[in-house]
Amino acid sequence: MRVVVVGAGPAGMAAARTAADAGAEVTMVDSEPEAGGQYLRGRAGFQHSGVTHLGNTEAWLVEDHTLHLRGPRRLAFDKLVIATGAYDRPLPFPGWDGPGVITAGAAQALAKQGVTLAGRVIVAGTGPFLLPVATALQDLGATLVGVYEASSPARWLREAKAVAANRHKVGELARYRKVLPRLETRTAVIAKRGPDVTVAKLDGGWHPVSHRTVQADLVCIGHGFLPRTDLVPQARRTNDFLEVDEHQRTSVEDVYAAGEVTGIGGADLAEAEGVVAGAAAAGLTPPGKALEAVRRGRLFAAALARAHEVQPGWRTWLDQDTTVCRCEKVRLADLTDATSMRELKLSSRVALGRCQGRICARNAAELTGVPFDGQRRVIAVPIPLGELADLPEEKS
Amino acid sequence: MHPDVVVMGAGIIGAACAQALKARGLDVLVVDRHGPASGTSSAGEGNVLVSDKEPGPELDLARRSRELWPELAGDAEWEEKGGLVVATTPEAAGPLRAFAARQRAAGVDACEITPEEALAHEPHLNPAVTAAVHYLEDAQLNPVKATRYLLRGIEVKRTEVSTTDGRSVTTADGVISCGAVVNATGPWARNFGVNVLPRRGVVLVTTPIPGRIRHKVYDADYVGAVASGDADLQTSGVVESTQAGTVLIGSSRQRKGFDDTIETEVLTALARRAIAMFPMLADVPVMRAYGGFRPYAPDHLPIIGEDPRTPGLWHATGHEGAGVGLAPATGRLLAQLLTGEEPLVDPRPFRVDRPEVMV
């Protein structure tokens, strides 16, 4: 049984280990040199008998039972586990595309590499992920101006069941106690011009009700996450995230998914899903303990998604000149009254640039009311024509 | 709601028909399950070509369309970039010259140039070119913008039609009665009684390299692939840039129903052919691939006219890969036939009651 795992974060590593322990021949592919994913950033020290780890390797297409890698190279599999994670969703506001604004994920990645980021820093957006980012930046000596959470904490009061089942998650908040005094809820950065940052108090729908100006050198934003699902464009998804059954099977035959690509719930849920996916892919019944951890974790993930759901009022933060698509320099005023994503893209050029809409497509859809058709890119990463021309002919 | 005409399909052909009918004072409603240009029209390169057509009825329609487009294109990035057809082997040179000579006799501006002149036009072209023809009339536009421009002032209702009797259409949202119905559903036209089948095509899009490729450049074997009815995969090199600086690479032809799976076999063949024409493309990254379905009739001619079996039902489909290029004349011809005007071209080659077309 050949199991190929794409992604070497907590979910991918767990899937690879579990499948190997079950006797499968496992290859784990990841674009970073070292395993660990965004969570452990190369500090996982991954090594496991029966797992071949291919670092620095990008996968760009799944074709039947073959995974195509840059190189070019191909890997045949019997079962595939997608554990490619998610990336930050930034919401646009005037100035978000200018200097001094980066995603919270990028800030955390730099912080994990020990890069010291400039003086006065704001972390803004929604979700508990803002807290570790703020903590990491403060630990590196940044002056934390504020941590601005757009949602209302009251939304969590409806989620008693999920919280009760995941008390350890609440305990984790203690790790971030140093930054909690800087936390303001129902608050957002809605403009940045040079060092002047407009900070607004929001109503429940994220419409600004009042604002003030503060000074900051760097604003780190993250308004939730978008899953990296490019390798399985045909898979069924809910709100972008891959749909999986109780054994982490996607709607595509012999393809499993684990971790943030199925929903945002933290590293422990990702790891549990990886164990379930790895066992199932290798043909075993997944361990009950992991199944139970997934069940509980999903309760929490669903609560998290509800409590930190992006509210439509963000659309009022932009003015007509605000950039929506950075690659193609498309402003709000350039978006057309289209009825489909394809029509919107080809009539305004939004989402047609280098990032292929990874950053802006969802935002553009919400700004125009066009139904979002998910991220269906058939080539997951750019690949030189010369490499395409050299693809081996034989099917393995 | 009781429009004079319901046009089924908001692609470039449906939009051109609607525009031409509206221009004749008719009240037109367009219906489409996904909205403007959401199918074949947005899956191509937006080509308006005369270069790839043998003398005959389709070339006549193409030439009339080419005259009409500049006025109808509005803000759709109309560009008279010209086409450059090249032979890349000694054997292909003779047939290309003969083809161009036949086109010239039919009135096409097909200017034979030397390989050196071809390289002056396209400095990155493979110097191994053996013959070249420059077609000044070949043009390009943004097909989505063009569709939207043609549809301005015309109501587009987003709904799916299940059946029509030529006097009404039954949609998911109820029955709409009308004076006539136009079937402009492209590769899905078979649902309404004409033998049109999908022929798959894939286009690769590179990251922007502005200014490096100036014309639509294609290999002379493209013409043979267009005219073929073979079910197997056929590819030929077609390379051009867009106003955004990206390079579009085609073309592939495959008959496999509505299967839209991307196959590396196709990507590889397209990449090889593009590099054979422009060696510098080997280092340029492809950032996406997209595909669509050309609507083709078995005899490779568009179907434009009233269905003799269902009075009131008109067809405008079967344009294969040339729908953008043929749209304005198709719309005008259909509107002229429907209103009893003198037609701009002989409509008989496109009639519905061809034996291959009636199903």
Image: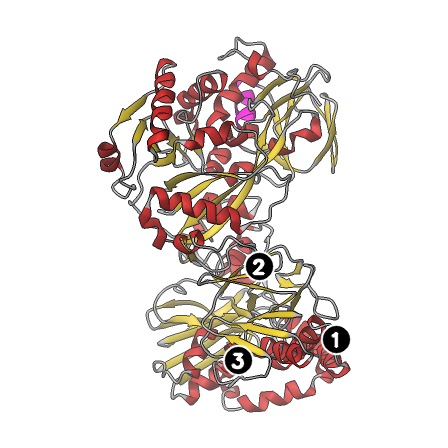
Up the image or down, B356 lies above or below A310; here it is: above
Residue A267 on image: x %, y %: 60, 80
The amino acid type of the residue labelled 1 equals Leu
Residue A302 on image: x %, y %: 68, 72
Kindly state the secondary structure of the residue where label 3 is placed. helix
Give the extent of the magenta segment: B16-25
Up the image or down, A247 lies above or below B56; here it is: below
The amino acid type of the residue labelled 3 equals Tyr
Image quadrant containing the N terminus of chain A = bottom right
Choose top left, top right, bottom left or bottom right for residue A137: bottom left
Q: Residue at x 52, y 26 (%)?
A: B16
Kindly state the secondary structure of the residue where label 1 is placed. loop
Residue A48 on image: x %, y %: 58, 83
Residue tagged 1 = A284
Is residue B232 found inside the magenta-colored segment of the image? no
> Can the viewer see residue A343 in this picture?
yes
Which of marks 1 and 3 precedes in the sequence?
Answer: 3
Residue tagged 2 = A396
Distance between mark 3 and mark 1 Cα atoms? 28 Å
Of the pair B80 and A319, the residue shown nearer to us: B80
Of all chains, the one bearing label 2 is A
Residue A331 on image: x %, y %: 42, 53
